[in-house]
Amino acid sequence: MRKTIIASVALLLASSTAAFADASDGKVKIGILNDQSGVYANFGGKYSYEAAKMAVEDYGGKVLGVPVEVVTADHQNKADVASNIARQWYDTEQVDSIMELTSSSVGLAVQALSKEKKKITINTGAATTELTGKQCSPYGFHWAYDTHALAVGTGGALVKQGGDSWFFLTADYAFGYSLEENTGNYVKENGGTVVGSVRHPLATTDYSSFLLQAQSSGAKVIGLANAGLDTANSIKQAAEFGIVAGGQRLAALLFTLAEVHGLGLEAAQGLTLTEGFYWNRTPETAEFGKRFLERTGAMPNMVHAGTYSAVTQYLKAIEKAGSDDADAVSKALHEMPVSDIFTDNGKVAANGRMIHDMYLMQVKKPGESDIPWDYYTVLATIPGDQAFIDPAKSGCDLVKQ
């Protein structure tokens, strides 16, 4: 009997040790790295952190029997700051995966470091298609949207409405370049022309000289290839110059619910934009939105909901793999369909792009909004295989030709 008890205890200890070996360090640790004090603070920021914590709580707080922890930091929109934080998280703080990564320069830098360290990154805030193009990684995933999807949605809609000549006001870094290039290519492929462009520094406060160049170009559409407060301030100052009143149209190429709320319906009404999520689209998204609002005081945009989805899918992948080993988790992420409050038909392609439907929206007039945060009319659903680049044409060397 004594030998049987000892053997049983030994077996139990061995099983316990094996379980903890499958989840390194006896826990799973997720880092949310983004802009929390600059132009993208509402675009992602503290709200993405809350979305990540909400996902962990809804999952039960554990995976493979060990606790899941979420940490966060502000990268200040600086790639070197982000890389230093990521390196410290990986080397000394046992972080297993980094997510959100608002701003493309940061997303590319951290994904490259994570490839070297064999760690999973899931970009929900960065936009550049290079993340799943020439700079793709076997451990890198791109979740909520990208510049190609924005170009197909907003750019495509305006070209069809007669906006066939464009001038771009572009944020002077990787995201802006990618958004301008993708939209410009799409405009030209559909018979339009690009008459010029001008680049502005990130987080500038005076857009007057840039807007005057756009106005004098005579283009039918001024494409705002920027985001966050940069876009909101561009729109405000464009009104002061009478640009829309003069017959030109503004295309907010990356504008989300957070920025519409900050700008207000009076100023934002009529804008056409593209998002991957809208809280008031289905009963399920509305229920999630209301829970998020109670928690944060704000309704989620596609970055916040995308972060919730990414964290949830990452935990599901660990469960499926039976381990938090990056190779095993990456394999599971590629194999598993994505079905949650963000999308019900998502799939991860060989280049790490999560392909899902996008939505073309128009901002309502003040009198058309019946309840708080009800800002959009959904004009069209853009199927995922149209919204995103064909993986075989992405330039990613992970895709078998």
Image (cartoon, rainbow, N blue to C red):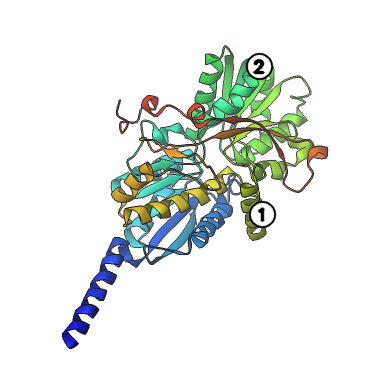
**Up-down: is 394 above or below 356?**
above
Residue in the picture at 21% in, 77% down: 10
Horizontal arrangement in the rendering, residue 223 relative to residue 351 (left or right)? right
Camera-side residue: 373 or 112?
373
Camera-side residue: 283 or 111?
283
Q: Which mark is drawn over residue 290?
A: 1
Residue in the picture at 37% in, 56% down: 319
Three-letter amino acid code of the residue under disc 2: Ala
Estimate how packed mark 1 is, as few (under 14), some (14 to 19) or many (20 or more) residues with alpha carbons within 10 Å: some
Q: Which residue lies furthest to the right in this view?
A: 367
Query: Residue 293 appears at what percent x and percent y?
Result: 66, 55
Camera-side residue: 166 or 377?
377
Three-letter amino acid code of the residue under disc 1: Lys
For disc 2, the marked residue is 219
The reply to whether residue 76 is visible in this rendering is no
The kind of secondary structure element at disc 2 is loop
Camera-side residue: 170 or 200?
170
Query: Residue 206 appears at what percent x and percent y?
Result: 66, 35
Horizontal arrangement in the rendering, residue 352 relative to residue 197 (left or right)? left
Estimate how packed mark 2 is, as few (under 14), some (14 to 19) or many (20 or more) residues with alpha carbons within 10 Å: many
Q: Residue furthest bottom?
A: 2
Query: Residue 164 appears at what percent x and percent y?
Result: 63, 15
Label 2 vs label 1: CA separation? 41 Å
Residue in the picture at 61% in, 41% down: 228
The kind of secondary structure element at disc 1 is helix
**Up-down: is 67 above or below 253?**
below
